[in-house]
Image (spheres, grey):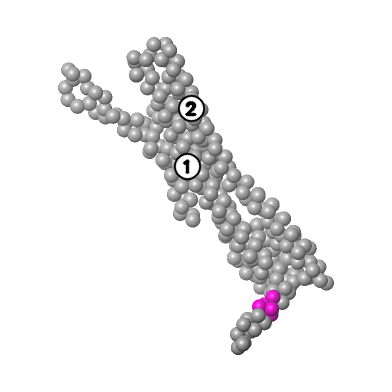
Amino acid sequence: MKKIIAILVLFALLLPLSALAQEAPPPNPPANAAGEVAAQRQTLWDIIKTGGWAMWPLGLCSIALVTMCILNMRMVSRKNLIPAGVILPIRAAAAQRDIGQVYALAKAAPNLFTRGLIPGLRKLNTEDPVASKPDMEGAIAEAVSREEAQVGFWINFLSLITGIAPMIGLLGTVSGMIGAFQKIGMGGMGKPELLAANIGEALITTATGLIIAIPAMVAYFIFRNNLSRIVRDAEGEYSAILDSITGTGSIFAEVDQEIADEGTQPA
């Protein structure tokens, strides 16, 4: 997963430069010119100047895309949100029904998993743990929902970039076409060299906006799906811990064993 995200980051950073900085075709030499005309290569600065004002906000979008990918790569990971080094001791303490130890371990290692577990532990009624299980599950679900929204806040910036970058590119396209039509109105119809800058602005800004938006969209779905998978895994761990604490796990294990035994008996 990290390799895929790293590729997206490099794609978002380098592709706008390499895809647009293409080699310009050599001009047609005049009839009286001798020899071949050397092809000229556009620099990045030439492309930025051709793209006009829209290239500056698009450049900021590209920087924001790389920043958000790096930030979410660090945040949205199992090691950060549901570390195994924290879950295993908690499950061991829950199996012994040592509620104090479970609470102490959760408080000592703050992360998405423990911040969701602690509100559930506070709802535990030690005199009737089975009856308090629904309240514990509700408190955990509410806390996890808040934690998921907090982590997803930074993922949503990728969705924002996905929507903004093509719009800025489209606005640059409209700006370039307006300039081209203005020059046509001033008598530039028979002079294509006068229209080249405005047409180049229209095409370059559109291409740049799409080049930024496509990896942003892919990165958004990767991080969002990764977060959803981590939350589902956390819910499974919560269920196992609550079953151990309330003793319901052993009850259902006995029922399952009785059903299995009945199924193996000869008719």
Q: Residue at x 54, y 47 (%)?
A: 220
Whole-percent x, y for residue 119 in the image: 75, 60
The reply, left or right, for residue 211 in relation to residue 26 is right
Amino acid identity at mark 1? Ile
- Residue extending farthest to the right is 127
Assess whether residue 256 is covered by the magenta stretch.
yes
- The residue depicted at 47 percent of the width and 20 percent of the height is 178
Residue 17, given in percent of the width and then of the height, sits at 40, 37
On-image quarter of the C terminus:
bottom right
The amino acid at mark 2 is Gly
Q: Secondary structure at mark 2?
A: helix
**Residue, disc 1:** 214
Residue at far top of view: 186
Question: Residue at the spot x=58%, y=58% of the render?
Answer: 229
Instruction: Say which element carries label 1.
Output: helix
Placement of 51 over or under 70, stated as above or below: above
Q: Quadrant of residue 131?
A: bottom right
Counting residues from the start of the chain, the first of labels 1 and 2 encountered is 2
179 within the magenta span? no
Query: What is the CA distance from the residue labelled 1 to the residue labelled 2?
Result: 18 Å
Q: Are marks 1 and 2 in contact (CB under 8 Å)?
A: no
- Residue nearest the viewer, comparing 265 with 154: 265
* Towards the viewer: 42 or 263: 263
Task: Return the residue at label 2.
Answer: 172
152 lies left or right of 142: left
The magenta stretch is 252-257
Q: Is residue 61 above or below residue 237?
A: above
Neighbour tally class for label 1: few under 14, some 14-19, many 20 plus, Cα within 10 Å: some
